[in-house]
Amino acid sequence: MSNAEALLKNKRSVSKGHLPLKNATGFVQTNVEKNLVSQLLLFYHVLCKFASNIEVNSKD
């Protein structure tokens, strides 16, 4: 499929009311949601690092 065909298909899907911008799970996300999700993932990552450090230190 050429770029022109892809653009036409995109325009058709937008005109039908479908939003082409979707994330991997298929849900349309706003920038606020993306920011929130990335912050939650970062917090979870830091929390796991902290918890693993506590476990390592308690074994010593």
Image (tube, grey):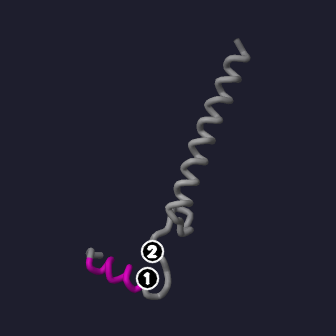
Furthest-right residue in this view: 58
Indicate whether 33 appears above or below 40.
below
Q: Is residue 6 magenta?
A: yes
Q: Label 1 amino acid?
A: Val
Q: Dot 2, crowdedness within 10 Å: few (<14), some or many (≥20)?
A: few
Marks 2 and 1 in Cβ contact (< 8 Å)? yes
Q: Dot 1, crowdedness within 10 Å: few (<14), some or many (≥20)?
A: few
Indicate whether 58 appears above or below 6.
above
Q: Residue at x 37, y 83 (%)?
A: 11
Q: Residue at x 40, y 86 (%)?
A: 12
Q: Name the residue beneath numbered marker 1.
A: 14
Q: Is residue 11 left or right of residue 40?
A: left
Q: Is residue 59 left or right of residue 45?
A: right
Q: Residue at x 30, y 76 (%)?
A: 1
Q: Name the residue beneath numbered marker 2.
A: 20
Q: Label 2 amino acid?
A: Pro
Furthest-top residue in this view: 60
Q: Is residue 42 magenta?
A: no
Furthest-front residue in this view: 32
Q: Residue at x 43, y 87 (%)?
A: 15
Measuring from the top left, give residue 43's x and y in whole percent. 61, 41
User: Tag 1's secondary structure?
Assistant: helix
Measuring from the top left, give residue 19's x and y in whole percent. 48, 77
Q: Quadrant of residue 36?
A: bottom right
Measuring from the top left, give residue 33's x and y in whole percent. 56, 60
Q: Quadrant of residue 6?
A: bottom left
Looking at the picture, tell me which residue is in the foreground, 14 or 25. Answer: 14
- The magenta span reads 4-12
User: Tag 2's secondary structure?
Assistant: loop
Magenta segment, prevailing SS (helix, strand or loop) = helix
Q: Name the quarter where the C terminus is drawn.
A: top right
